[in-house]
Amino acid sequence: MNERLGKIGSAVTGASVLAFALDMIIRLVTESDIVFMSYLASFFIAVGYVLLTASFVSVQKNKQLTAAGLAGVAFAVVYALLIFIVYYAMLTTVRMNAYLSEETLSIIKYEHLGSLFFNYNLLGYGFMGLSTFFIGFTVAPRKKSDRVLRLLLWIHGVFFISCFLMPMFPVFAPDMNGGKVIGTLVLLVWCVYFLPICILSWRHFTKKNGKH
């Protein structure tokens, strides 16, 4: 059951990352402002990732690594909570209320660079990076693919530093030229990086089932 849940988490996260990337590309090419699909995909990335982290902890055998694994799950939950708050507000309050003032939107609308919810979103992905760093310790490097997976998880932890610190400095100014395009390209780079983590995680849990 633990391995099966790990495969489900890997598949849900990977498919959602791919859907998110495709939506980003379509919006970049067509210059569309319709963001429903990317917001919905972000929900499922968070859901799949929490399942994935819990599965990594449940199948690892080294009791000395339990604390690191539990820390990874805890940070994953914090990430998911922040993402749910941000994107649920986008899908409901912001999308459904046409009478919100620009002043209000400058605080709660994710597309406004440097807004409160934009910073919450960055903080959420920062906690995801912190989570992957600790989860990396639970991956037993039995095969080359596991070693690559563990390294990718550890390196992804660096995102915590940048996501935590950037909102404190004028990196994303509201009047930044080309800010939306730059933000989209950064997200696409993240998708390209994280998708292999999902694929290698699937392989990791498939081998646990003895199919490879």
Image (cartoon, grey):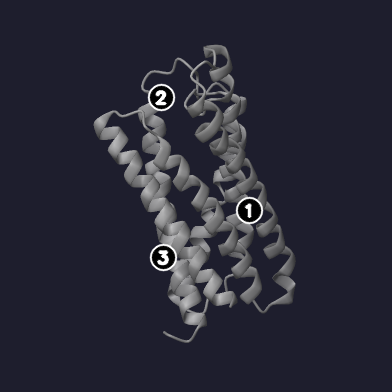
Q: Is residue 192 visible?
A: no
Residue pictured at 44% horizontal, 67% vertical: 200
Q: Nearer the viewer, residue 126 or 33?
A: 33
- The secondary structure type at the circle numbered 3 is helix
Q: Report the amino acid beneath label 1.
A: Ala
Q: Earlier in the sequence, mark 1 or mark 3?
A: 1
Which residue in the protein does label 2 denote? 179
- The secondary structure type at the circle numbered 1 is helix
Horizontal side, residue 39 vs residue 68: left or right: left
Q: Earlier in the sequence, mark 3 or mark 2?
A: 2
Q: Nearer the viewer, residue 193 or 50?
A: 50
Q: Earlier in the sequence, mark 1 or mark 2?
A: 1
Q: Report the amino acid beneath label 2.
A: Gly
- Give the answer, above or below, for where 129 lies relative to 119: below
Residue pictured at 36% horizontal, 46% vertical: 21
In the picture, the disc for residue 76 is: 1
Q: Horizontal and vertical percent for residue 132?
A: 58, 56
User: What is the count of numbered marks?
Assistant: 3
- The secondary structure type at the circle numbered 2 is helix
